[in-house]
Amino acid sequence: MPDAVFSAYPLDTGRMADLEAVFQARGCAEARRCYCMYYRLAHRDYQPTPGLNLSESNRARMRALAGADRAPGLIGYLDGQAACWISLGPREDFARLATSPTMRRVDDTPVWSIVCFVVPSQHRGQGLAHRLLQEAIRFAAAQGARVLEAYPVDREVPARADAPWFGSLSQFLAAGFEEVARHRPGRPIVRLRLREADHPPGD
Protein backbone atom coordinates (compact mmCIF):
# COMPACT_ATOMS: atom_id res chain seq x y z
CA MET A 1 0.00 0.00 0.00
CA PRO A 2 2.53 2.63 -1.06
CA ASP A 3 -0.04 5.43 -1.07
CA ALA A 4 -1.73 4.54 2.21
CA VAL A 5 -1.70 7.24 4.88
CA PHE A 6 -0.14 6.07 8.16
CA SER A 7 -1.03 7.57 11.53
CA ALA A 8 -0.73 6.51 15.16
CA TYR A 9 -2.63 7.42 18.32
CA PRO A 10 -2.33 6.57 22.01
CA LEU A 11 -4.72 3.90 23.21
CA ASP A 12 -7.66 5.18 25.23
CA THR A 13 -10.99 3.57 26.04
CA GLY A 14 -12.51 5.03 22.89
CA ARG A 15 -9.97 3.11 20.79
CA MET A 16 -10.33 -0.28 22.50
CA ALA A 17 -12.45 -1.57 19.60
CA ASP A 18 -9.58 -0.70 17.25
CA LEU A 19 -7.11 -2.58 19.43
CA GLU A 20 -9.44 -5.58 19.44
CA ALA A 21 -9.66 -5.44 15.65
CA VAL A 22 -5.87 -5.69 15.42
CA PHE A 23 -5.69 -8.55 17.93
CA GLN A 24 -8.55 -10.45 16.28
CA ALA A 25 -6.86 -10.37 12.87
CA ARG A 26 -5.09 -13.34 11.34
CA GLY A 27 -1.66 -14.04 12.76
CA CYS A 28 -2.35 -12.48 16.17
CA ALA A 29 -3.40 -15.49 18.25
CA GLU A 30 -0.86 -14.78 20.99
CA ALA A 31 -1.97 -11.16 21.23
CA ARG A 32 -5.60 -12.26 21.58
CA ARG A 33 -4.64 -14.37 24.57
CA CYS A 34 -2.40 -11.98 26.46
CA TYR A 35 -3.65 -8.52 25.36
CA CYS A 36 -0.09 -7.30 25.97
CA MET A 37 -0.44 -7.94 29.71
CA TYR A 38 2.09 -10.78 29.99
CA TYR A 39 5.08 -8.54 30.73
CA ARG A 40 3.06 -6.06 32.77
CA LEU A 41 2.15 -8.68 35.39
CA ALA A 42 4.32 -10.72 37.71
CA HIS A 43 4.10 -14.47 37.17
CA ARG A 44 1.88 -14.96 40.23
CA ASP A 45 -0.60 -12.35 38.95
CA TYR A 46 -0.88 -13.62 35.39
CA GLN A 47 -4.04 -15.59 36.13
CA PRO A 48 -7.67 -15.31 35.00
CA THR A 49 -10.01 -13.43 37.26
CA PRO A 50 -13.03 -15.36 38.62
CA GLY A 51 -15.70 -15.92 35.99
CA LEU A 52 -13.47 -15.00 33.04
CA ASN A 53 -10.94 -16.85 30.94
CA LEU A 54 -7.39 -15.53 30.61
CA SER A 55 -8.05 -13.62 27.39
CA GLU A 56 -11.13 -11.91 28.83
CA SER A 57 -9.25 -11.08 32.03
CA ASN A 58 -6.34 -9.54 30.15
CA ARG A 59 -8.66 -7.57 27.92
CA ALA A 60 -10.31 -6.06 31.01
CA ARG A 61 -6.90 -5.24 32.45
CA MET A 62 -5.82 -3.52 29.24
CA ARG A 63 -9.09 -1.56 29.14
CA ALA A 64 -8.34 -0.31 32.65
CA LEU A 65 -4.90 0.84 31.51
CA ALA A 66 -6.46 2.52 28.49
CA GLY A 67 -8.51 4.63 30.89
CA ALA A 68 -5.46 5.80 32.84
CA ASP A 69 -3.67 9.12 32.41
CA ARG A 70 -0.78 7.58 30.46
CA ALA A 71 -1.61 5.39 27.47
CA PRO A 72 -0.07 1.89 27.55
CA GLY A 73 0.80 2.01 23.86
CA LEU A 74 -0.03 3.26 20.39
CA ILE A 75 -2.31 1.96 17.66
CA GLY A 76 -1.13 2.44 14.09
CA TYR A 77 -3.63 3.09 11.30
CA LEU A 78 -3.54 2.75 7.54
CA ASP A 79 -6.04 5.08 5.87
CA GLY A 80 -7.91 5.27 9.16
CA GLN A 81 -8.15 1.51 9.70
CA ALA A 82 -6.44 -0.02 12.74
CA ALA A 83 -3.42 -1.98 11.47
CA CYS A 84 -0.80 -2.47 14.22
CA TRP A 85 0.11 -1.94 17.86
CA ILE A 86 3.13 -1.16 20.04
CA SER A 87 3.27 -1.49 23.82
CA LEU A 88 5.59 0.78 25.79
CA GLY A 89 5.95 2.64 29.05
CA PRO A 90 8.27 3.13 32.02
CA ARG A 91 10.20 -0.04 32.72
CA GLU A 92 8.62 -0.18 36.17
CA ASP A 93 5.23 -0.76 34.51
CA PHE A 94 6.45 -4.17 33.32
CA ALA A 95 6.74 -6.31 36.43
CA ARG A 96 8.01 -9.39 34.63
CA LEU A 97 11.10 -7.61 33.34
CA ALA A 98 12.39 -7.50 36.91
CA THR A 99 12.70 -11.30 37.00
CA SER A 100 13.80 -11.89 33.40
CA PRO A 101 17.38 -13.18 32.96
CA THR A 102 17.33 -11.97 29.35
CA MET A 103 15.95 -8.49 30.01
CA ARG A 104 17.34 -7.78 33.48
CA ARG A 105 18.46 -4.25 34.26
CA VAL A 106 21.66 -2.97 32.72
CA ASP A 107 22.13 -0.18 35.27
CA ASP A 108 20.13 2.30 37.32
CA THR A 109 19.29 4.61 34.41
CA PRO A 110 15.53 5.40 34.34
CA VAL A 111 14.22 4.06 31.05
CA TRP A 112 11.03 3.48 29.14
CA SER A 113 10.67 -0.01 27.66
CA ILE A 114 9.25 -1.21 24.36
CA VAL A 115 8.06 -4.77 24.88
CA CYS A 116 5.75 -5.67 22.02
CA PHE A 117 4.79 -5.08 18.38
CA VAL A 118 1.64 -6.64 16.94
CA VAL A 119 1.24 -6.57 13.16
CA PRO A 120 -1.43 -8.82 11.59
CA SER A 121 -0.36 -11.10 8.74
CA GLN A 122 -2.10 -9.00 6.10
CA HIS A 123 -0.02 -5.92 7.00
CA ARG A 124 3.42 -7.49 7.34
CA GLY A 125 6.19 -6.60 4.92
CA GLN A 126 5.04 -2.99 4.58
CA GLY A 127 7.38 -1.38 7.11
CA LEU A 128 4.62 -0.69 9.62
CA ALA A 129 6.69 -1.70 12.64
CA HIS A 130 9.39 0.77 11.60
CA ARG A 131 6.86 3.57 11.17
CA LEU A 132 5.19 2.73 14.46
CA LEU A 133 8.57 2.78 16.20
CA GLN A 134 9.13 6.34 14.95
CA GLU A 135 5.81 7.35 16.50
CA ALA A 136 6.69 5.56 19.75
CA ILE A 137 9.93 7.54 19.96
CA ARG A 138 8.00 10.79 19.62
CA PHE A 139 5.36 9.68 22.11
CA ALA A 140 7.90 8.67 24.77
CA ALA A 141 9.79 11.93 24.36
CA ALA A 142 6.56 13.92 24.69
CA GLN A 143 5.80 12.03 27.91
CA GLY A 144 9.12 13.12 29.38
CA ALA A 145 11.11 9.91 28.88
CA ARG A 146 14.84 10.42 28.46
CA VAL A 147 15.98 6.95 27.45
CA LEU A 148 14.01 4.37 25.45
CA GLU A 149 15.04 0.72 25.84
CA ALA A 150 14.06 -2.39 23.87
CA TYR A 151 14.86 -6.12 23.79
CA PRO A 152 14.87 -7.19 20.13
CA VAL A 153 15.87 -10.41 18.44
CA ASP A 154 19.21 -10.51 16.64
CA ARG A 155 18.34 -12.61 13.61
CA GLU A 156 22.00 -12.84 12.61
CA VAL A 157 22.64 -15.18 15.54
CA PRO A 158 21.85 -18.81 14.62
CA ALA A 159 18.97 -19.85 16.89
CA ARG A 160 15.41 -20.97 16.82
CA ALA A 161 12.73 -18.36 16.11
CA ASP A 162 12.39 -16.45 19.35
CA ALA A 163 9.89 -13.85 20.54
CA PRO A 164 9.24 -12.05 17.22
CA TRP A 165 6.93 -9.58 18.99
CA PHE A 166 10.03 -7.82 20.38
CA GLY A 167 11.06 -6.67 16.91
CA SER A 168 14.41 -7.18 15.19
CA LEU A 169 17.80 -5.73 16.11
CA SER A 170 18.22 -4.33 12.59
CA GLN A 171 14.95 -2.43 12.93
CA PHE A 172 16.09 -0.69 16.11
CA LEU A 173 19.59 0.04 14.83
CA ALA A 174 18.04 1.69 11.78
CA ALA A 175 16.06 3.93 14.13
CA GLY A 176 19.20 5.09 15.94
CA PHE A 177 19.26 2.71 18.91
CA GLU A 178 22.58 1.34 20.17
CA GLU A 179 23.28 -2.00 21.79
CA VAL A 180 24.20 -1.60 25.48
CA ALA A 181 24.13 -5.19 26.78
CA ARG A 182 23.51 -8.79 25.81
CA HIS A 183 22.65 -11.23 28.58
CA ARG A 184 21.79 -14.01 26.14
CA PRO A 185 23.01 -14.76 22.60
CA GLY A 186 20.56 -13.42 20.05
CA ARG A 187 18.81 -11.09 22.52
CA PRO A 188 20.54 -7.70 22.81
CA ILE A 189 19.33 -4.78 24.88
CA VAL A 190 19.30 -1.51 22.93
CA ARG A 191 18.77 2.10 23.95
CA LEU A 192 18.04 5.47 22.40
CA ARG A 193 18.66 8.75 24.24
CA LEU A 194 15.55 10.72 23.45
CA ARG A 195 16.98 14.19 23.92
CA GLU A 196 18.93 13.40 20.74
CA ALA A 197 15.88 12.07 18.93
CA ASP A 198 13.66 15.05 18.20
CA HIS A 199 13.78 13.97 14.56
CA PRO A 200 14.36 10.19 14.46
CA PRO A 201 16.20 8.64 11.49
CA GLY A 202 13.87 8.16 8.57
CA ASP A 203 11.90 11.40 9.04
Image (spheres, grey):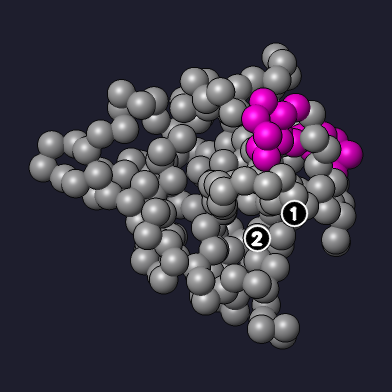
- Residue extending farthest to the front is 158
Q: Is residue 162 magenta?
A: no
Crowding near the residue tagged with mark 1, few <14, some 14–19, many ≥20 C-alpha atoms within 10 Å: some
Name the residue located 46 percent from the left edge and 25 percent from the top edge: 95
Q: Quadrant of residue 51?
A: top left
Classify mark 2: residues with Cα within 10 Å, few (<14), some (14-19) or many (20+): many
Q: Is residue 141 left or right of residue 26?
A: right
> Residue drawn 70% across and 14% down?
108
Q: 18 or 114: nearer the eye?
A: 114
Q: Assign a secondary structure to mark 1.
A: helix
Does residue 137 appear anywhere in the picture?
Answer: no
The answer to whether mark 2 and mark 1 are in CB contact below 8 A is yes
Q: Identify residue type, mark 1.
A: Gln
Q: CA distance from mark 2 to mark 1?
A: 8 Å
Quadrant for the N terminus in the image: bottom right
Seen in the picture, residue 147 relative to 76 is either above or below; the reply is: above
Query: Percent x, y for residue 139?
Result: 68, 47
Q: Which mark is residue 129?
A: 2
Closer to the camera, 110 or 97? 97
Give the percent coordinates (x, y) of residue 110: 69, 22
Callout 2 secondary element: helix
Q: Which residue is mark 1?
A: 171
